[in-house]
Image (cartoon, rainbow, N blue to C red):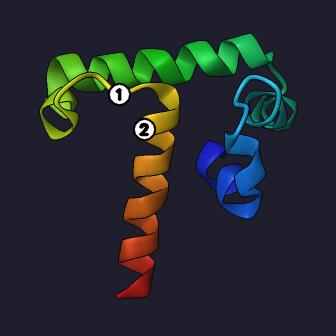
Amino acid sequence: VALEAAGADPALIKNLSKGLYPAVAERMRTTPACVERALRNAIYVACERGGLDARFGHCPTNREFILYLLDQLALRCSR
């Protein structure tokens, strides 16, 4: 849902806490804080168990991770 919203309106990424998180929270019937925490936890787990930090050189921020995923989707769709 976050990638779909960010892809449809890139301005949401400029301020995650006032843009993307509330948009996703409304759609998922939860709070922006829960959206932020769930994303941060998913990234943390991917770094700890899946080696995501090796790709970035560090565990990425929520914004870095969302932008990375959007770039990867754009690359795959352009093929």
| 5 to 46, vertically: above or below | below
Percent position of residue 35, x then y: 66, 21
Q: Residue furthest front?
A: 14
- Report the residue at 27% width, 26% height from top: 46
Task: Characterize the local packing of mark 2: few (<14), some (14-19) or many (20 or more) Cα atoms within 10 angstroms.
Answer: some
Numbered badge on residue 28: none
Residue pictured at 83% horizontal, 37% vertical: 23
SS for tag 1? Answer: loop
Question: Is 55 left or right of 18, judged from the image as shown?
Answer: left
Q: Amino acid at mark 1?
A: Pro
Q: Quadrant of residue 50?
A: top left
Q: Is residue 6 above or below residue 49?
A: below
Tell which residue pokes out farthest to the bottom in this image: 79
Q: Quadrant of residue 71?
A: bottom left
Q: Nearer the viewer, residue 24 or 65?
A: 65
State the residue position of label 1: 60
Specify whether 77 is left or right of 63: left
CB atoms of marks 2 and 1 within 8 Å: yes
**Which residue carries the number 2 mark?**
65
- Above or below residue 13? Residue 59 is above
